[in-house]
Image (spheres, rainbow, N blue to C red):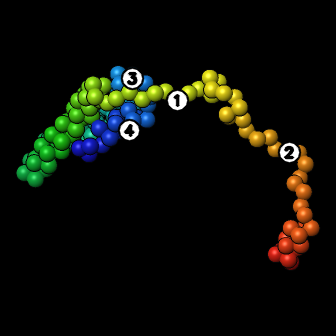
Amino acid sequence: LSVDYSVHIAHIFKESSGSMEERAIGAMTRIGPSVFHALFSTVLAVLVLARSKSYIFEIFFKVLFLVTMIAGFKGLWLLPVVLSIVGGSKEKPQDMNESHPEDHQVPQESSKPPKVTDDEQEEADVVYA
């Protein structure tokens, strides 16, 4: 739980391309809302324990609540800021239209079946017989 939010943001940052700022903004735009909803739902689930009178549940609430809040702060605020400063740029992949068309040609399939030699036919007859 303590690294879950950060890992999601870092993964999307790693997979995106552009300048450091573009990649950080892209990561927050793409996965930020989902990470926030995960954080929010975890906090709501833990809040049920806040009113418990049992000592063990009080301690469990305090620990889980603090871990969730610290992890959310690090994943949704601190990590994107740090990545936008030191994350590095990643070139955008070349578009298929901008590159040389001969580099990306798909071989055309022939409408005629391939010719089979007599030796290949005899081997096939022996194997399937």
Indicate which disc residue 19 carries.
3
Q: Which label's residue is closer to the chain start, 3 or 1?
A: 3
Indicate which disc residue 13 carries.
none
Residue drawn at x 66%, y 27% is 100
Secondary structure category for the residue under label 2 = loop
Disc 3 vs disc 1: Cβ atoms closer than 8 Å?
A: no
Q: Which label's residue is closer to the chain start, 4 or 2?
A: 4
Residue drawn at x 14%, y 49% is 60
Query: Disc 1 to disc 4, how far (Cα)?
Result: 18 Å
Query: What amino acid is at disc 1?
Result: Pro
- Whether residue 47 is visible here, answered yes or no, is no
- Figure quadrant of the N terminus: top left
Disc 4 vs disc 2: Cβ atoms closer than 8 Å?
A: no
Indicate which disc residue 110 carries.
2
Query: What amino acid is at disc 4?
Result: His
**Circle 2 Cα neighbour tier, 10 Å, few/some/many (<14 / 14–19 / ≥20):** few
Q: Nearer the viewer, mark 4 or mark 3?
A: 3
Indicate which disc residue 11 carries.
4
Drawn side of residue 125 relative to residue 7, left or right: right
Query: Disc 1 to disc 2, how far (Cα)?
Result: 32 Å
Query: What amino acid is at disc 2?
Result: Ser
Query: Horizontal and vertical percent for residue 58?
Result: 10, 47
